[in-house]
Amino acid sequence: MTPKSRLHIPQPSARPGDAPDFSYLSLSDAGAVARPDSDTPASQIENLASDLVRVLDDDGIAQGEWVPDLTTDQLLEALRMMLLTRQFDARMQRAQRQGKISFYMQSLGEEAISIAQGMALEPGDMMFPSYRNQGLFIIRGTSLVDLMCQCLSNTRDMCKGRQMPIMYHNKQANLFSVSGNLATQYPHAVGWAMASAIKGEEHIASAWVGDGSTAEADFHYALTFAAVYQAPVILNVVNNQWAISTFQGFAGGERRSFAARGLGLGIPGVRVDGNDLLAVYAVTQWAAQRARQGGGPTLIEHVTYRGGAHSTSDDPSRYRPKNEWDAFPLGDPVMRLKQHLVNTGYWSDEQHAALEEELKTFVNEAWKEAVTYGTMTEGPRLDVRVMFDDVYAEVPPHLERQRQQLLALREQSE
């Protein structure tokens, strides 16, 4: 009898009430993956898309050929930036629960990806972040007050009330606007990179999406253009195992790695331990060097875990074990870098605790300043006249008439 075809429905390895099960993850030992030259043809390094580049072992010891040339001061600054990102997230999460802002998304467990890549890339490189890359804004010098004011939609909101919270931008720091329409940043980054190459510049672009967004059409369009035109771009997939409540298998993660998506187009793919700051830095530096010397795009899959809810509108206890984050085999990126620094003798538990308190105070002071510009429930309010700005270089007559009508109505009501 001819066997009948069956529809396959991907299933997560564990649901609420089950013990966490990460047996589906393919892991490599720290230092086990060789580091090829950055100009190696993609056809000769296909193993990088299935192996996992790791530097820090379970004891926090750096191993292998991917160990980056980072000074102790740089590592301490990286730790500081990751902790600052985590403290900022925690404060904004509380603000949403207190009704001060309407919405928020934490990057808990993913801090190393943004901080390491922000360190590895050049100031002139253009970044196209996703909504869990607040660390990129922090590492590139965006003030916490400005980030907070955007979430508050107050009188100092960089988006002037036109974007939902966390959709930051920073033109001066080469950070493109965060987009709520997923995967749009991929074709934007590829287009920017193509333009940079046309102009003969050395700057490259880098973009980030989650594992679920790899199912979007924009993801595949961007890969095709990047491959055909050899655009100097780094395309990052942050595989944190969950796209809201949907397990990464629904985006195709069961069959092959997300890093392997580009192999058919000749784009090298690299799987990296996303919770290992040293490994992320080294792989990013490798891909950036490849792009700058004409080697074209690289697709990097960061294997990590979303430690918190998808957003303040989500309850992860309804679809995954409550203690799954604690059981993730690649650990906590902050604690792993801390342990590495403790091992080298440049850090201690006492210094770490003191730094946490220092940063908590710093974040609270920034919040006190931010709310002086207004909150959702308390003034001052954003001037409604700004809705007419930033659309046309010169405001057309019909909009100017509407603005004047609005002013007249406001005067009547006061």
Image: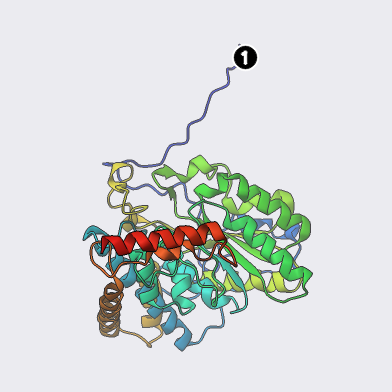
Residue pictured at 47% horizontal, 51% vertical:
25
Residue pictured at 51% horizontal, 51% vertical:
181
Dot 1 alpha-carbon crowd within 10 angstroms: few under 14, some 14 to 19, many 20 or more: few
Location of mark 1 (residue):
2
Residue pictured at 71% horizontal, 57% vertical:
226
Residue 236 coordinates in the image, percent (x, y):
57, 60
Q: Does residue 335 appear left or right of residue 7 in this picture? A: left
Q: Does residue 410 appear left or right of residue 131 in this picture? A: left
Residue pictured at 39% horizontal, 81% vertical:
341
The answer to which image quadrant residue 109 occupies is bottom left
Residue 212 coordinates in the image, percent (x, y):
50, 47
Which of 48/218 is in front?
218
Which of 209/126 is in front?
126
Identify the coloring. rainbow
Q: Amino acid at mark 1?
A: Thr
Is residue 273 placed above or below 137 in the rendered structure?
A: above
Find numbered disc 1 in the image and state the secondary structure of the residue it sits on.
loop
Mark yes or no: residue 56 visible. Answer: no
Q: Does residue 159 appear left or right of residue 382 in this picture? A: right
Which of 18/30 is in front?
18
Residue 116 coordinates in the image, percent (x, y):
50, 73
Residue 192 coordinates in the image, percent (x, y):
67, 65
Outermost residue, left direction? 98
Quadrant of image for the N terminus: top right
Which of 223/152 is in front?
152
